[in-house]
Amino acid sequence: MKTTSSESSVSAVNASRRHFIVGSASIASGGLALGLSASWSDRADAQAAPNVASVAAGDTEVTAWVVVKPDDSCVIRIARSEMGQGTRTGLAQLVTEELECDWAKVSTEYPSPGQSFARKRVWGEMSTGGSRGIRISEDYVRRGAAATRIMLVQAAADGWKVPASELSVSKGIITHTASGRTTSYGKVAMAASKLTPPDPKSITLKNPRDWKVAGKAMRRIDTKSKLNGSLIYAADLHFPGMLCAAIKACPVHGGKLVSFDGAKTAGMRGVKGAVRVNEGTVAVLADTWWRAKTALEKLPVVWDEGEYAKASSATIAASLRAGLEETGGQYAGRVEGDALKAIAGAAKKVEATYSTPFLAHACMEPMGCTVRYTPERAEAWVPTQNGEASHTALSESSGLPLDKCEIYKMDLGGGFGRRGGQQDYVQQATAIAKQFPGTHIKLLWSREEDQGHDFYRPISMAKMTAGLDDKGDLVGMQIRISGQSINAWVNPLAIKEGKDERQVQGFWAQPHDAQWGYTVPNLRIEYAMRNTHVPVGPWRGVNTNQNGVYSECFMDECAKAAGKDPLEFRRAIMKNHPKHLAVLNAAAEKFDWNKPLAPGRHKGIAQFMGYASYSAAAAEVSVSPKGEIKVHRMAFALNSGHVVNPDQVAAQIEGSVAFALSAMFYSEVTVENGRMKELNFDTYRLLKLAEMPKVETVLVPTFDFWGGVGEPTICVVGPAVLNAVFAATGKPIRNLPLKNEGYTFA
């Protein structure tokens, strides 16, 4: 691996770091920019990390999205990050579909944020989160591929002096049927690269119903490298002379570093020194990470734990409960009719309070990255969900302009929202690297540091109240959520007049993203913001994974109070939501809802919407007298509008089951003396393979919108299982995780 650094040979856009941060949000990420002139083959920094966009000798960049090699193989540029969700393969399928190249000859590479910045953001937005990797970029990626195909075909037509309309192309072979002549992409790529690209808006894309590569269960591009161990993760990187850094932050969030005694570790084998990273963090550097970590554990450190040193789960819970009961301070997100009056006059009243805890991301690869700093240039090798955010963090932390910084994106060993907007690990590594100019500094957090200094899924509670008439029909419902605001931590400008609509995700009236799928004649939805000292951020499914539990478990409680089947109870209030109803019916059909189960088996069902996709699930469980729960099988239905790779969609659903069941049964991070308690997998348990149920999936795309896949179904896993347990025991479960309620996995 080449490890030297060089200045960029491409002049950068004249923009300040702050201007870029603000201005980039206004650049239309959906606009296609076809970059044709720049070549990166002579850049040392393009070779400094695996899988970085470059053009080797003999290769031709036809457009910014596609490089064609002389052997007719095609390299597809993927601007989004890959963290196991399959976005790289899905986007490559979409490009291949419109490009009409040979899938067997396709490979991929990452364009770097620095390259994109130097080329006026030619690859658009690089953020990968919110199940947006494909759905937000599919249009301009497909148009870029189609434009490339048009240029290649035109180059062949020009060479043969025939109209392009007389040519056809399949798997990278261009044919002139009338004369029988053929040529290949590799032979015409250079001529094509000199043509003027067509207007992207003029291009007619293929009908998804006619797809031949996209829409099919193609094998993932990255499977082989993961199986044979050749894929390089950030934790695997090694450079000659590299130093490894282990880090420790104040155990109480918001606390400060007072002092440390580096002399106590100075004589330890391989140790190069202890340094202050920022006002709340210290690091030890050594020639290996384990030596750095061992020395850090022996480093005397004095902390100022600050005003939150006495905070606990109990004090936080009391604050949330107050938010459920207060008469002022909360805001009403939706007011339709008069819910309070309808409930007061109802024949029967149903009321329940639910709670969900802080959750850690628990990525298999803890936070970390490698940074090399000199006064002239800063480079970072980062497993990031947002390359541009990492680029900005490197620039801000190093004090160098964006054109003097570069990010080499690595595949992530897990993300789930943790490696997106929060770039603390990049900032820390850069701060350390500035104290060792010219040396590669590889920072890797310990598991305890990763668990103790996460941006957690916010804690919340919900008080649900409903009124039923004498026929058992819903006449009114009040939903009040009390909890911590993600935006208060990561995007304060999104909070308007104290309102954070993000926290009632899934209860929205508006269609297209996270609409509540029920019609209740009188409805009131409220949110009481109760922020704590614990930092929070997006966690797979963000707020739908909590709000789905509140909504769907309460629907079953209402159905029981009404004396009705849970499926039929839902159907009656979903007539104005045909797409929600369709996936509910599809899941019920896949599950054989009306078919009797074996003795001792019970069923539950749920539906919810998130990330512009409609999902539903049904679960079959058994519960022993000792409270041992066995989840035997689950059936899912998903309408994501389009399906790029059905096998990947099924895999994402199965992954959401493992993620959600872990959270439902075991996972929580509690607070004691201001600090997080569950710091490793001995106390923060994850699902075991033997505990995974059978999962069946039916996809019901309607081909009229683009929805997400990675996060939507997580919100229906928990409530479907919890409702089945409710059916089995007659006792609703309102507080998670289940281990605290006396339940275990069978």
Image (tube, helix red, strand yellow):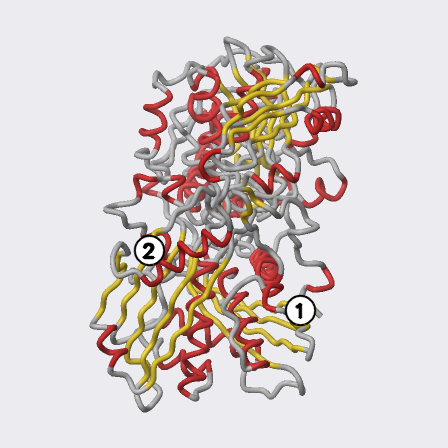
Q: Residue furthest top?
A: 375
The circle drawn on residue 528 is 2
How far apart are labels 2 and 1 at the CA level? Answer: 38 Å
Image quarter in which the C terminus is found: bottom right
Q: Earlier in the sequence, mark 2 or mark 1?
A: 2
Closest to the observer, 25 or 671: 671
What type is the residue that disc 2 sits on? Ala
Question: Residue 124 versus residue 244: which sits nearer the camera?
Answer: 244
Residue visible at 53% across and 23% down?
Answer: 258
For this view, does 17 lie left or right of residue 358? left
User: What residue is pinned by disc 1?
Assistant: 694
Decide: few, some or many residues near mark 1? Use Cα within 10 Å; few <14, some 14-19, many ≥20.
few
Q: Between residues 374 and 318, which one lies in front from this camera angle?
A: 318
Residue 396: image location, x then y, percent: 43, 21
In the figure, residue 323 lies in which quadrant? Answer: bottom left
Asked whether disc 2 touches disc 1, contact meaning CB atoms under 8 Å apart, the reply is: no
- Above or below, comparing residue 323 to residue 256 in the picture: below
Q: Residue furthest right?
A: 269
Q: Quadrant of residue 228?
A: top right
Residue for point 66% across, 54% down: 685
Position in image of residue 731 (x %, y %):
53, 78
Q: At label 1, which amino acid type do we have?
A: Lys
In this view of the protein, can residue 102 be seen by the observer?
A: no
Q: Secondary structure at mark 1?
A: strand
User: Of circles 2 and 1, which is in front?
Assistant: 2
